[in-house]
Amino acid sequence: MKREHWGSRIGLILAMAGNAVGLGNFLRFPTQAAQNGGGIFMIPYMISMIVIAIPLMWIEWGIGRYGGVRGHGTTPAIFKLFWNHPLAKYLGVLGLFIPFVVVAYYVYIESWTLGYAWMSISGMLPDQAQLAGLAGDARLKPFKEVLAGYTGMNGEAIYKPSLMAYGFFAFTMLLNIWILIKGISGGIEKLAKVAMPALFVMAIVLMVRVITLETPQGTAIEGLNFLWAPDWSQFLNPKVWLAAAGQVFFTLSLGFGAIITYASYLNKNDDLVLSGLSAASLNELAEVVLGGSIAIPAAAAFFGVVAAQEIASSGAFNLAFVSLPAIFSSIPLGSFFGFVWFLLLFFAGLTSSVAITQPVVSFFEDEFKLSRTLSVMATMALLLPISHVAIFLGNALDEMDFWAGTFFLVVLALIEVVMFLWIFGMKKAWEEMNRGGIITIPAFFRPIMQYVTPAFLSIILVWWCMDILPNVLKNSEWTHWIAREVLIGIFATFAFLAFLAEKRRKRG
Amino acid sequence: MKGDALLFMLLSWGIVLTLTTYCFSKLFNNKQCQRPKGERR
């Protein structure tokens, strides 16, 4: 069975950018910048981009194309090509485990954005008349109640989501399945060609509307001042540097295995240096220019700078599903702008969720020679029960997000660097990455990739082990333990499948 | 806007916009990119 290929270079770049541009660009970036020194955050952010993100991005593209040419799109088999040791495939299992666990809860959150888009345009959210006379926290309270009612996240062990939340989840899942069945060029690439331009247009519309906001509490310009004013006292704070390194890591979707799988659908001599950089630049455009100019400036204009600081520190969900709807409900054509905001998030989420589902689909296609449709169905048969754990089991979403969506990302990235640059060899890896390049990777990246990137990744990992891990392990309610057992079960299942796949390969 | 905030915002935007412009001008001026590559199978 021949592997698929991308239909066009621009389609590939938009799909890769779609993978990277997610909810984090519009929610995580502004809250991280606001909490970590404002403008000063951009210095470690840009440095981390050069020493971690861009090198790792090229490494993942290189690994993916190398594997794809040899018929493999996922890390269990690709790592075996670099290191012929039984352990290699089990290390590669992380490249299935991470995207699988993340997509299990990500699709659910993505479906909230579609649900909220529907509620905005159909007038189901609290409107100006209901909010008359309310200010500050009192104005946010009705929206907090709507979110609690919608998701059923009530602080108890078992969540009770609304029927509407479940309905939108089912619809979003079906939409993902339909796109994935259509294939790389017929589904994912076509989606990217429509969704990415639409996403940028919607973000620009919102940015223009937000920048012109002015209320008695403040203006959007004050919000930009708050977000971008450099707090020099934070410049040497290691937490700020680690937050910036974490942000560039998440924003380019590194360590998920998705870039590797997408790049495996390249031809042997296709450019990856400029294509990768172009996809990364689109992601940065969406994050730094557009992501920084919507949520926080809007919050400052409506609630004042002091309240905007509190909103920023209360987290990304609060900003997206409580503060922003409250703001849009107070402006002319608010239901339309609310709809645009949530549809923008939905498009950002959809292009990412198909990308992170693709590794497991490719695994079934490449290693078990299943048809596209059967591979998607097999993936969904495994995925649906796990998604239900995230939907109904209290604390499961946080637990999954920490292990798969944070901790193991860095572990996998470090393994990728070691496998590709150290075991496969720097010389061969460098030639592999540069082959067919429209531009070549500047020579100064060679020592950065080989030494600085893994050193930075190790520092992040050690810091997290000392700073965050003990707090996470302190959580010992039964729901946390069930979630952890589910995660171990998922890893064991993929390890067994990788074992079967290798046996099958050996039988020829 | 305050001077230092404006400076940091414009510098950050400038870096990102310059990178994007560079990448896409290189892409669109490259012969490989003027026709669709790859094939649908």
Image: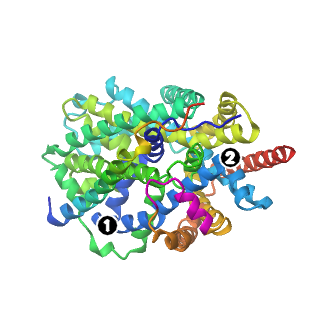
In the rendered image, residue A304, in percent from the top left (x then y), is placed at: 20, 52
Residue visible at 52% across and 42% down in the picture: A106
For the C terminus of chain A, which image quadrant?
top right
Q: Which residue is mark 2?
A: A72
- A424 or A394: nearer the viewer: A424
Residue stretch rendered in magenta on the structure: A427-440
Q: Amino acid at mark 1?
A: Gly
Q: Which badge, 2 or 1, comes first in the chain's sequence?
A: 1
- The secondary element bearing badge 1 is classed as loop
Q: Amino acid at mark 2?
A: His
Instruction: Name the chain letter of the residue that bears numbered label 2.
Output: A
Residue B18 lies, with reference to residue A104, above or below; the image says: below
Instruction: Name the chain letter of the residue that bears numbered label 1.
Output: A
Q: Are marks 2 and 1 in contact (CB under 8 Å)?
A: no
- Dot 2 and dot 1 within a common chain: yes
| Mark 2 burial class by Cα count in 10 Å: few <14, some 14-19, many 20+ | many
Residue visible at 32% across and 31% down in the picture: A339
**Closer to the camera: disc 2 or disc 1?**
2
Q: How is the image coloured?
A: rainbow
Residue visible at 18% across and 66% down in the picture: B4
In the rendered image, residue A239, in percent from the top left (x then y), is placed at: 42, 70
Q: Which residue is mark 1?
A: A37
**View extreme (front): residue:** B31
